[in-house]
């Protein structure tokens, strides 16, 4: 009887643990468990939670963490690559379609008009490039050349071969009034494409030469030949620096092999002052202020 009761109880224990037996069955099982150590021990074992080996759980958790970390890194790398590609494409698109690139002055037709009263120089022109539209004009002083203003015309690419794009430009700039000779250049992609479109250098040179000729004729008692006034302001010289045009005045005709240096003169760039070089003091001596 006891074995039968034990067999029945063992079959019913899973239902007993889950509270699925009837009240009558539950009473019988409780009575049996009070007197049967084997069934009580079996109940105790069945009631314990199933716990896996802790070391195996730790290993599995570590593995899952590593997999998750690698996936996260892969996501970050993919997102970073996509961001870089997006930025590069955006920059190239902005550079090509919005900002554009410098137009070579050799592909342009241009003209200029200079107002001596306002010292304003207006440059007007157009370029002959298909599928290209005027996108902007940049004006800045040259960082290498003194008293030089650079104008860069930009054109952006377009994709219609039939549409008429704006290819004409006009720019007015103010020439600084600092008494110096200025030049205006049109730039392309590189400095080698620079084209000088205007300068007042030679006008100032002629004015200074006329001023010096009149002074020498009237005050120094001789009339120098303009052809033998040798302007050489950019040559290397040991003379003190002077902000003006420098000439060497020779006694004889410049074509004569016996011509000798008579004196060295300078006229300020605005033709208002005349200087003569004094060899003894190695300095320029002011001879006259033309405006006074």
Image (tube, rainbow, N blue to C red):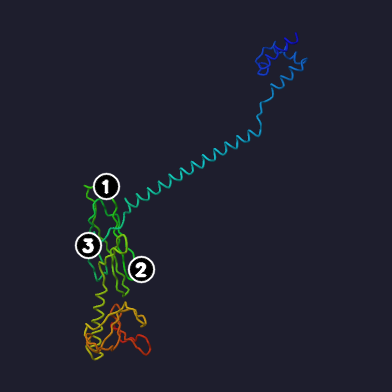
Q: Which residue is mark 2?
A: 144
Residue 179 location, x and y as percent? 31, 75
Q: Are marks 3 and 2 in contact (CB under 8 Å)?
A: no
Indicate the secondary structure of the residue bearing disc 1.
Answer: loop
* Residue found at the far right of this picture: 35
| Residue 52 appears left or right of 255 | right
Distance from label 3 to label 1 (Cα)? 26 Å
The N terminus: image quadrant: top right
Identity of the residue drawn at 25% across and 81% down: 209
Q: Looking at the image, is 78 positioned above or below residue 221?
A: above
Q: Which residue is mark 3?
A: 110
* Residue found at the far front of this picture: 257
| Residue 2 appears left or right of 156 | right
Q: Are marks 1 and 2 in contact (CB under 8 Å)?
A: no
Distance from label 1 to label 2 (Cα)? 37 Å
Corner quadrant of residue 2: top right
Distance from label 3 to label 2 (Cα)? 25 Å
Indicate the secondary structure of the residue bearing disc 3.
Answer: strand
In the rendered picture of this protein, how many numbered marks are placed on residues? 3
Q: Looking at the image, is 180 positioned above or below residue 108?
A: below
Q: Looking at the image, is 42 positioned above or below residue 153?
A: above
- Work out whether residue 200 or residue 75 is closer to the camera in this orientation and state it: 75
Residue 133 location, x and y as percent? 26, 53
Task: Sort mark 2 into few (<14), some (14-19) or many (20+) by Cα contacts within 10 Å.
Answer: few
Corner quadrant of residue 236: bottom left
> Which of the marked residues, 3 or 2, is nearer the chain's N terminus?
3
* Residue found at the far bottom of this picture: 221
Q: Which residue is mark 1?
A: 159
């Amino acid at each position: 009887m006891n074995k039968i009761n034990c067999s029945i109880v063992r079959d019913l224990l899973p239902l007993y643990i889950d509270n699925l037996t009837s009240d009558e069955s539950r009473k019988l099982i409780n009575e049996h468990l009070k007197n049967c150590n084997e069934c009580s021990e079996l109940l105790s074992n069945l009631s314990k939670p199933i716990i896996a080996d802790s070391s195996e759980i730790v290993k599995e958790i570590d593995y899952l963490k590593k997999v998750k970390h690698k996936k996260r890194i892969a996501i970050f790398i993919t997102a970073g690559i996509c961001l870089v590609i997006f930025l590069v494409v955006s920059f190239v698109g902005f550079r090509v379609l919005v900002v554009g690139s410098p137009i070579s002055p050799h592909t342009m037709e241009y003209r200029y008009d200079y107002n001596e009263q306002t010292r304003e120089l207006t440059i007007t022109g157009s370029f002959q490039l298909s599928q290209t539209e005027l996108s902007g004009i940049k004006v800045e002083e040259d960082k290498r050349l003194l008293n030089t203003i650079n104008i860069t015309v930009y054109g952006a690419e377009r994709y219609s071969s039939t549409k008429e794009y704006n290819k004409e430009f006009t720019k007015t700039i103010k020439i600084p009034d600092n008494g110096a000779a200025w030049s205006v250049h049109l730039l392309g992609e590189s400095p080698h494409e620079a084209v000088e479109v205007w300068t007042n250098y030679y006008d100032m040179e002629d004015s200074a030469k006329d001023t010096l000729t009149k002074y020498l004729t009237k005050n120094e008692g001789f009339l120098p030949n303009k052809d033998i006034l040798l302007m050489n302001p950019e040559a290397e010289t040991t003379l003190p620096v002077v902000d003006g045009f420098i000439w060497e005045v020779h006694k004889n005709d410049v074509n004569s092999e016996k011509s000798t240096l008579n004196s060295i003169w300078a006229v300020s760039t605005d033709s208002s002052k005349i200087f003569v070089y004094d060899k003894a003091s190695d300095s320029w001596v002011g001879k006259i202020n033309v405006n006074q």
